[in-house]
């Protein structure tokens, strides 16, 4: 478990520092940013749950611990299928939730999930 949290920390530092190799556009004003790790052997995401505000853009920085041919995610109804995530690389997934509720972040190929809680923004 410690290795996974260390990897999450590295992803956050790389994103914050504007690591080379990442081509990021400016974040939308008020964007909610999160790091997300896919772990195929463990059949889970880290963290297992995210809470975001409705109507504000969301930007996920996603990586994986395992080299797999199907490391894509979906967040229905906003993201049908992301780019492929590979170990050591970060993909960026952006969307703006327009309804309150609980939704699934799903690994497209292996179908393990995390929870996305969308709450009203105040």
Image (cartoon, rainbow, N blue to C red):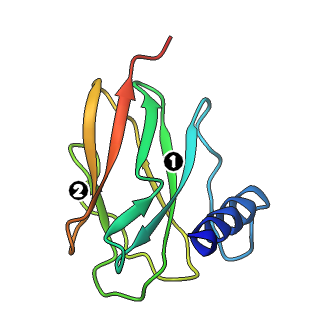
- Residue 6, image x and y in percent? 67, 69
**Number of other residues with Cα within 10 Å of mark 1, as a class: few under 14, some 14 to 19, many 20 or more:** some
| Residue 100 screen position, x and y as percent | 29, 23
The local crowd at label 2, few if under 14, some if 14 to 19, many if 20 or more residues have their Cα within 10 Å, is few
Question: 53 above or below 70?
Answer: above
Write the residue at 62% across / 54% down: 25
Position of 60 relative to 11 (above/below): above
Quarter of the image for the N terminus: give it: bottom right
In the rendered image, the residue lying farthest to the top is: 122
Q: CA distance from mark 1 to mark 2?
A: 15 Å
Q: Which residue is mark 1?
A: 59
Residue appearing at x 27%, y 25% in the figure: 99
Q: Earlier in the sequence, mark 1 or mark 2?
A: 1
Residue annotated with mark 2: 80
Q: Which residue lies at the image location 70% right of the left edge and 68% below the top edge? A: 10
Asked if residue 97 lies left or right of residue 37, the reply is: left
């Amino acid at each position: 478990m410690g290795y996974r949290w260390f990897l999450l920390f590295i992803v956050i530092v790389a994103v914050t520092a504007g690591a080379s190799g990442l081509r990021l556009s400016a974040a939308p004003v008020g964007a909610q940013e999160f790091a997300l790790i896919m772990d195929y052997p463990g059949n889970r995401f880290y963290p297992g749950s995210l809470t975001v505000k409705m109507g504000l853009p969301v930007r996920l920085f996603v990586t994986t611990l395992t080299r797999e041919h199907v490391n894509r995610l979906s967040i229905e109804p906003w993201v049908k299928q992301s780019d492929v995530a590979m170990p050591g690389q970060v993909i960026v997934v952006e969307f703006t939730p327009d309804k309150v509720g609980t939704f699934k972040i799903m690994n497209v190929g292996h179908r393990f999930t995390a929870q996305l809680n969308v709450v009203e923004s105040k």
